[in-house]
Amino acid sequence: MRPPVCGRRRIPAGAVRQALPPPAAPAPAPPGKRAARTPVSLDANVAAALATIEKTVSKCRRCLLAKTRTRTVFGAGSTRPPVIFIGEAPGAEEDRQGLPFVGRAGQLLTKMLACVGFGRGDVYITNVLKCRPPGNRDPQPQEVACCEPYLLEQLALLKPRLICALGRHAAQTLLKTDTGINKLRGRLHDYHGISLLPTFHPAYLLRNPADKNKAWEDLKRIRLLVDEKTG
Ligand code: URA
């Protein structure tokens, strides 16, 4: 990663929401008149639908990972993300907190995002698997088969313009290929009609800092693609 001269840094959407007063309650209808329908924002609908799936996931027993997990890790971030970052599976810290990418790799991911002007609340972060494989072993195909439908539901609600697959495992699983990450990254692929750009996993970058400049190129490309599509 280049020295973190973080231009274009945006105020995280969550911070803005926190600073705003809660919406006023609708005025009661005069006697004999029907109350006007309360406008429900799209964001609130998406948040509610996500919360319903998250509850289902928290009770999921489709595979044996349910026996060893501490908490399920559903995902976190904006309800209208231009881009979703997808890792392979929660690690130890994520399993403890129930949140994605909050360990050492997650801290690097947060810095990488900040360097291209994204706060964690501007994007959405999740994993292919919602439960930690014991000892951080690779996810098994049968676990992926059980869990991927949850990811598809998340994508259908969040409607991102772009997906960034973090690391070899997420990229190979989503793209149903065994091509290596070095060949997959740097190219746009398709996942259920959504453009997908793979990059290195932040945990890999912690072990192989020489590849940070390639990840930096990928992130700049993601920023450009998002700006092109929103601009
Ligand atoms: N690695 C992942 O792939 N996902 C996490 O949430 C944390 C570490």
Image: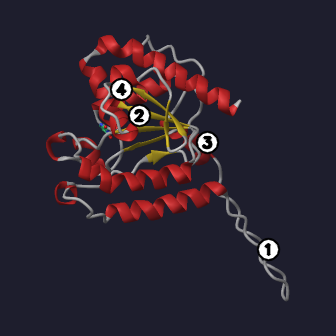
Residue occupied by mark 1: 36
Whether label 4 touches label 3, CB < 8 Å: no
Question: How far apart in space, not on screen, are marks 1 and 2 (Cα)?
Answer: 44 Å
Crowding near the residue tagged with mark 2, few <14, some 14–19, many ≥20 C-alpha atoms within 10 Å:
many
Question: How far apart in space, not on screen, are marks 1 and 3 (Cα)?
Answer: 28 Å
- Label 4 secondary element: helix
Residue occupied by mark 3: 16
Decide if residue 138 is on the left or right side of residue 85.
Answer: left
Whether label 1 touches label 2, CB < 8 Å: no
Question: How far apart in space, not on screen, are marks 1 and 4 (Cα)?
Answer: 48 Å
Q: Residue at x 22, y 46 (%)?
A: 140
Q: Is residue 193 above or below residue 115?
A: below
Mark 1 or 3: the one toward you: 1
Whether label 1 touches label 3, CB < 8 Å: no
Residue occupied by mark 2: 165
- Label 2 secondary element: strand
Q: Is residue 115 visible?
A: no
Q: Residue at x 38, y 65 (%)?
A: 56
Q: Is mark 2 within 8 Å of ligand 1?
A: no
Along the viewing direction, whichever of 109 and 32 lies nearer the viewer = 109
Q: Residue at x 77, y 77 (%)?
A: 28
- Label 1 secondary element: loop
Q: Earlier in the sequence, mark 3 or mark 2?
A: 3
The amino acid sitting under disc 3 is Val
Residue occupied by mark 4: 108
